[in-house]
Image (tube, rainbow, N blue to C red):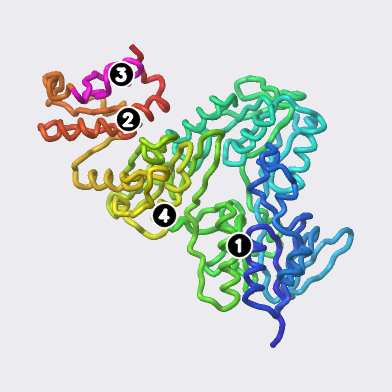
């Protein structure tokens, strides 16, 4: 049997998952892994936590070494080997090693090129001396060396995505004064704005300054200047605007590229060229929910893709099923997670939204804490389109359940029948996941009808708003224009509620108001429940709140 030359360009998640899986299935072929950096397998998701010293030892970031990969898998791993040209007709690549060029032939070429950080060319950045991006071990070495040697007192993080906010937390925990600057109107783009606002508030509560809807236009020494002239101390700057596929190598090879310069692949990970395949952050995938092209730079999809491609090249019947972008981040004391599509991505869908708040485990058991959950589903098909959540604990479990439900094409109504592990320290007899199913079924059966926070202002032009919380809670803060009729007094004060217009009922989290809705609906009122209640509206529309 002829040995094949399998050449992998790029390691870490996609490349190493491919190489190790392929070796387990094919003991005879030659497998060469090339990486232009000094490390072929490292925990890039752990880099911010090394900066904060939560991960104490640098060696803990190194997943494995080329020597271990040779010993365990007979992989020929070559670091600091930069591929500079692909000769697809000759089926070879040109590799720059130090000051010389090597030619390596391949039978199958696997590209795991990854993504590169976006670096903004801001006036004054060339003389600042303390501006960094974070993507790999050399990057983290530069940042930690700078902190250790120059002892910066202030930092700004440009970009409020996952890595940006992890870095903001890490630098704050290192004792720096930290500011986050985000060009869009919210932090954490995968979340909808009402969920993201809680993340912004957590940052502010922990002493991080947050500036949204603005950008840095200039550096003046160690000062950063924002669009409105605001000056911020910036001894250290982390640029975390996002990433782009690192596909410059492919332009001369005329391999088909698509959105944002990503690599176009089919469902078998083949590029436009036979015998050239691609996985990881640099490829374009389909989102199975809306069937649209997307790019998802996350470790978990890259690992799966590498393994799937190894199976495919070994003759197994596997295919690329796309990715729904499940992600999670810790911001100080809270966890924020999402899966699937958010409302910003649902133009053209007929969808419904449910906001729920419930304890992570039984309320009578010590240390219960709230989980906030948002579930979005298709009003016609009943398929779950996306979910978002936050809380101190238990969020990961719920988002993972919903991500599994989406991938399995569960209907939102099916959530009420899921059998989830329960004991008082771990959950509730009716978990928040089950509650989402109950709420969705109530909407389908017209037992309950809701409106969202962003619909309230327009709806109130011809509606009456009734706050059914206790009087002392109402007086501490309520939506402007609401009349207060506590649930316990509702049936005795019906003369205060008009039957000639819509009635909107609200409470803290929309649970008590649901009970009020049922009473009024049975009495013939045209009534709607404010989904999520005061807890959401007060955060996202603080100008619409009155305190007695």
Asked whether residue 468 is drawn in magenta, I would say: yes
Q: Quadrant of residue 272?
A: bottom right
Among the two numbered marks 3 and 2 on one chain, the one whose residue lies closer to the N terminus: 3
Residue contact at pointers 2 and 1, CB within 8 angstroms:
no
Badge 2: residue crowd in 10 Å (few <14, some 14–19, many ≥20): many
First reached walking from the N terminus: tag 4 or tag 2: 4
Callout in the foreground (4, 3): 3
The numbered mark, 1 or 4, whose residue comes first in the sequence reads 1
Magenta region, residue range: 464-488
Q: Nearer the viewer, residue 369 or 423?
A: 423
Q: Would residue 400 appear left or right of 282 to someone viewing this image? A: left
Name the element at disc 1: loop
Labels 3 & 1 near each other (Cβ < 8 A): no
Determine which residue is flagged by label 3: 474
Residue at 48% across, 63% down: 321
Image vertical order of residue 302 relative to residue 368, above or below = below
Query: For the residues carrying marks 3 and 2, which lies nearer the camera in this image?
Result: 3
Name the front one of labels 4 and 2: 2
- Left or right placement of residue 389 versus residue 247 in this view: left
Q: Nearer the viewer, residue 149 or 261?
A: 149
Tell me the CA gap for discs 2 and 1. 44 Å
Q: Quadrant of the C terminus?
A: top left
Tell me the residue that label 1 is attached to: 279
Q: Which residue is mark 4?
A: 290
Question: Relative to 289, is 128 on the left or the right?
Answer: right
Indicate the secondary structure of the residue bearing disc 4.
loop
Q: Eyeballing the image, is 368 above or below 222?
A: below
Q: Secondary structure at mark 2?
A: helix
């Amino acid at each position: 049997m002829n040995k094949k030359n399998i050449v992998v360009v790029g390691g870490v998640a996609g490349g190493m998952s491919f190489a190790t899986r392929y070796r387990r299935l094919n003991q005879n072929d030659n497998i060469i892994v090339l990486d232009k950096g000094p490390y072929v397998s490292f925990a890039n998701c752990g880099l911010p936590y090394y900066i904060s010293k939560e991960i104490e030892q640098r060696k803990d970031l190194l997943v494995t070494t080329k020597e271990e990969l040779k010993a365990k898998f007979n992989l020929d791993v070559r670091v600091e080997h930069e591929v500079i040209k692909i000769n697809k007709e000759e089926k070879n690549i040109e590799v720059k090693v130090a000051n010389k060029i090597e030619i390596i032939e391949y039978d199958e070429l696997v590209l795991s090129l990854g993504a590169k950080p976006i670096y903004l060319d801001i006036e004054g950045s060339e003389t600042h001396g303390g501006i960094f991006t974070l993507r790999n071990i050399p990057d983290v070495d530069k940042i930690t060396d700078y902190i250790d040697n120059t002892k910066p007192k202030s930092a700004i993080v440009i970009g409020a995505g996952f890595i940006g906010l992890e870095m903001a937390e890490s630098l704050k925990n290192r004792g720096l004064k930290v500011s986050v600057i985000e060009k869009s109107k919210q932090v954490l783009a995968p979340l909808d704005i009402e969920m993201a606002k809680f993340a912004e508030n957590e940052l502010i509560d922990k002493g991080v300054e947050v500036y949204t809807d603005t950008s840095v236009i200039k550096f003046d020494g160690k000062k950063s200047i924002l669009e409105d002239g605001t000056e911020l101390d910036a001894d250290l700057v982390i640029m975390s605007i996002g990433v782009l596929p690192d596909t410059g190598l492919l332009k001369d090879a005329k391999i088909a590229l698509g959105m944002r310069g990503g690599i176009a692949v089919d469902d078998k990970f083949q590029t436009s060229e036979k015998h050239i395949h691609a996985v990881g952050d640099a490829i374009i995938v389909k989102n199975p929910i809306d069937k649209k092209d997307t790019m998802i730079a996350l470790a978990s999809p890259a690992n799966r893709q590498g393994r799937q491609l190894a199976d495919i090249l070994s003759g197994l019947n596997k295919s690329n099923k796309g990715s729904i972008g499940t992600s999670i981040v810790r911001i100080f004391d809270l966890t924020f997670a999402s899966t699937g599509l958010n409302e910003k991505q649902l133009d053209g869908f007929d969808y419904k939204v449910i906001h729920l708040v419930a304890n992570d485990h039984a309320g009578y058991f010590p240390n219960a804490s709230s989980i906030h959950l948002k579930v979005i589903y298709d009003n016609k098909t009943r398929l779950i389109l996306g979910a978002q959540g936050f809380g101190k604990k238990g969020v990961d479990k719920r988002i993972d359940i919903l991500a599994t439900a989406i991938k399995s094409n569960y209907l939102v109504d099916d959530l009420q029948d899921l059998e989830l592990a329960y004991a008082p320290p771990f959950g509730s007899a009716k978990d928040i996941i089950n509650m989402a199913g109950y709420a969705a079924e109530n909407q389908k059966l017209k037992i309950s009808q809701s409106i969202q926070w962003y619909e309230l202002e327009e709806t109130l032009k011809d509606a009456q708003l009734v706050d059914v919380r206790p009087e002392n809670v109402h007086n501490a803060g309520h939506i402007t224009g609401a009349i207060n009729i506590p649930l316990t007094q509702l049936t005795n004060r019906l003369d205060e509620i008009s039957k000639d217009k819509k009635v909107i009922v609200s409470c803290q989290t929309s649970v008590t108001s649901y009970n009020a809705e049922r009473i009024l609906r049975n009495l013939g009122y045209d009534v709607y429940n404010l989904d999520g209640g005061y807890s959401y509206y007060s955060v996202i529309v603080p100008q619409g709140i009155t305190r007695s």
